[in-house]
Image: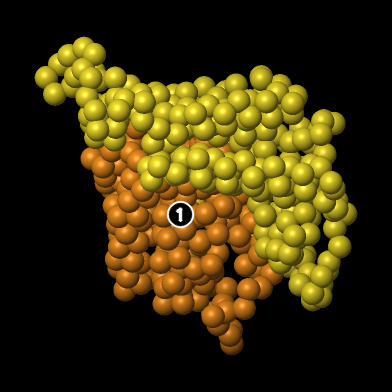
Amino acid sequence: MNRMISYVKKDTWIHRLSGVTKLFFFLLWCITSALTYDTRILLVMIAVTIAVFVMSKTAWRQVAPVFRVVLFFMVLNVAAIFLLSPYQGCEIYHHRAVLAPLFPGHDLTAEELFYLFNVVIKYFAITPAIFAFLVTTDPSEFAASLNGIGIPYTAAYSVAIALRYIPDVQDDYHRIRNAQEARGIEMSSKAKLTDRIRRTSSIIFPLLFSAMDRIDVVSNAMELRGFGKKKRRTWYAHRKLAAADILVMAGTAAFCTFALVFTFHDGDRFYNPFV
Amino acid sequence: MKKFGIKEVVAIGIGTALFVALTEVQIPTGIPNTSLQPRMAVLAFLSAIFGPLVGAIVGLLGHALGDALFYGSVWWSWVFPEAVVGILIGAFAKKFAVREGGFAKKNIVLFNVVQVVANALAWILLAPALDIAVYAEPANKVFLQGAAAFLGNILIVGILGSLLLAAYSRIAGKSASLEKED
């Protein structure tokens, strides 16, 4: 347990940025890394995200478990692509250079290797940015700044509640699971599928119903305090956008525009070193 | 459409928290890399009670946040289909009448028809299509993944989702139908 990444209070320039700035960076970064398959752009993006990650002074220990999960799924994904579609790279790059025949129908080609390399660096272009975003963004400040850029405060409040209650719900889950295990319900994966579903539902039932109760309690409390009556509300954690925020947003937008223009200027999203 | 009230604000918040927290709860099926996700049943449950908007946002926000927190990368081509499931199931929220205690035989059948259609649309059509368009992944691989996700999800939503809704409907309906004692 406790594999989850959470906000850590520190004083770096990345921590001081507004949550909205970081969200803006994060979303544009996701879009760009998803759209481009240009190896050069992706390598630059990796360099930038790693620099951001280092400057955020995030302890490696904090993200290492999740990083292992990333690696695990990456290896799985790459293996699946190669097994199911060993010539995807050749189709993309319109070229075929067999390096080694592995087994029938699965020749190892330079194009496939290069394609898989691009798939892998797509992961690394985004993961450090996600880590930095999650670790440096204060949830209350984030909700406040969402409202600050014009998102209705009811929606900002939903986000604030979600971030606020994730640890609570997790605690509930573990408490209920421990209680069920103490009663002798085994949670290991040896049982039949139907039994496994039944056992999991013996946790989900109380968890969900206590969450439904919690929705009632919290919404009643908010109603009693007059939530939603006025058009605006003020925030304790609100911070105005500073010059650094504007600068980062402008820089991100400029880089991402450049990256997309650079990627698509030849009418193709792939960088093709083969022809 | 119903007004977006305080209850919906809180339901989105706590529903998303629940969805995210349940990301780590997986029931292995024995087939590699394919497990049943109880969080899908929770999404279906919340959509069927609170409607399409809550379903869409819980799916969208919950999936993106859950991916980021537990898997360190956000697979956007699978985030949006999640919202589609929430919207489609949520569109029938009035019909299901869960909180009025009306979620019995006929509505359970309707719920399952809707959830199978929603999951088919999301995981067999939309997710693989987005995978190919956005991530340029090989078609046979993504359709295989999509089909596996479809089967797992209709199973867990069909069994666990129906049970949860039926049980909740019995509890919620009871308090609304007190009988006068003589």
- Compared to residue A151, the image places residue A44 above or below, namely above
Q: Which chain is orange?
A: B
**Would residue B7 be seen by someone viewing this image from the given angle?**
yes
Count of marks, rendered view: 1
Percent x, y for residue A71?
A: 47, 23
| Residue pictured at 58% horizontal, 85% vertical | B180
Three-letter amino acid code at disc 1? Phe
State the residue in front, A91 or B160.
A91
Percent x, y for residue B154?
A: 32, 53
State the residue in front, A244 or B47.
A244
Q: Quadrant of residue B144?
A: top left
Percent x, y for residue A51?
A: 68, 25
State the residue in front, B118 or A95.
A95
**Would residue B169 be seen by someone viewing this image from the given angle?**
no
Q: Which chain is yellow?
A: A
Which structural element holds mark 1?
helix
State the residue position of label 1.
B80
Q: Quadrant of residue B15?
A: bottom right
Q: Residue A139 vs residue B8: left or right?
A: right
| Residue pictured at 42% horizontal, 73% vertical | B92
Quadrant where the N terminus of chain A sits is top right
Percent x, y for residue B117?
A: 30, 63
How many residues crowd mark 1 within 10 Å: few (<14), some (14–19), many (20+)? many
Q: Residue B119 vs residue A126: left or right?
A: left
